[in-house]
Image (cartoon, rainbow, N blue to C red):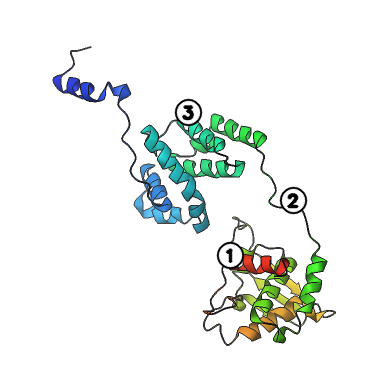
Amino acid sequence: MGTPTKAYRQITERFGTPERIPSPAPQAYPVCRAAISQALIRQGTPCSALDVMLNSLSTNTFKQYDSPLKLWWLFCREHSLDTYQASIPYILNFLTKCYQNGATYGTINTTRSALSLLMGPKIGSGDRIKRFIKGIFRSRPPMPKYDRTWDPGIVLNHLAECYPNEEVTLEKLTRKLVTILALTTGHRVQTLSMIKISNMKFSDSGVEIYIPDIIKTSRRGSTQPMFHLKAFIQKKEICPVNTIKSYIDRTSSIRKSTDKLILTSKKPYKNASTQTLDQYFAKQLSND
């Protein structure tokens, strides 16, 4: 090996030998979308395809990945790592730290998915990472969100008391509608929030409701939801078709140009979000 040059000696005296020179400290954490965009570009994605690839992730996914990526940025800054090129041992150290701080199996799995977007699929499919995730599953298995069931008959009996529909308040009618739709369709409130009047077809026997929008359960090759709700003429008080018609009539003067079925029950009237429908449903079940 030749004699080190003067420039080389100056660098090593100041920073150490090459194997000891630390990686540049990562920049401040950008927003999640920007971080993933940069990762895709570094992986060779042409800029012309970037927006299309980012569209593969929903807004909720970006929100879900934001928190673990912030923690990853802090970890990389602490250890002087490149956020887009870290070794498996460092990733395992990071996931272990998350586990020791109380992260659940689901949270760690989400973190792994987020890191896979930054550093490629090897992070998610590597043997050591997969074994670590399996160990988390065994030591801290995911628990069901709910550990008990409730009798829908009690709820339906209460809803039957909210009748005639024309005489109850708009908030009570909205809560009644959301609850009946949840019980009769079995779908998430996210799906219910996407129901549009233009996608409803009434008949003498009931109503068909088509959901063309992408929802959480949408998959390639699968059909979009189509609800077939029958008229419950034996008990109009809780008939889904009757309740929908009453709600549309009740809100016709306040819905302006919106096509969404369910609106907020207080001014300013607007399309009800998933969170708002959750609140309506929870209040109805608690008989608030």
Q: Disc 3 or 1, which lies upstream in sequence?
A: 3
Q: Dividing the picture into quarters, in which one does residue 187 lie?
A: bottom right
Of tags 2 and 3, the one toward the viewer is 2
Percent from the top left, x then y, of residue 135? 62, 32
Question: Which residue type carries mark 1?
Answer: Gln
Q: Disc 2 or 1, which lies upstream in sequence?
A: 2
Comparing 101 with 89, the one in front is 101
Question: Which residue type carries mark 2?
Answer: Asp
- Structural distance between the alpha carbons of marks 2 and 1: 22 Å
Name, please, the residue furthest toward the right: 234
Question: Which residue type carries mark 3?
Answer: Pro
Identify the residue under disc 3. Answer: 89
State yes or no: discs 2 and 3 in contact (Cβ < 8 Å): no
Number of other residues with Cα within 10 Å of mark 2, as a class: few under 14, some 14 to 19, many 20 or more: few
Q: Disc 2 or 3, which lies upstream in sequence?
A: 3
Number of other residues with Cα within 10 Å of mark 3, as a class: few under 14, some 14 to 19, many 20 or more: few
Quarter of the picture containing the C terminus is: bottom right
- Structural distance between the alpha carbons of marks 3 and 1: 39 Å
Comparing 196 with 276, the one in front is 276
Helix, strand or loop at label 2? It is loop
| Above or below, 10 relative to 280 | above
Q: Residue 275 carries which label?
A: 1
| Above or below, 18 relative to 246 | above
Of tags 3 and 1, the one toward the viewer is 1
Q: Dividing the picture into quarters, in which one does residue 73 lie?
A: top left
Residue at 48 percent across and 53 percent down: it is 62
For residue 72, side relative to residue 175 (left or right): left
| Above or below, 42 relative to 237 | above
Percent from the top left, x then y, of residue 171? 64, 77
Helix, strand or loop at label 3? It is helix
Identify the residue under disc 2. Answer: 147
For residue 149, side relative to residue 109 (left or right): right
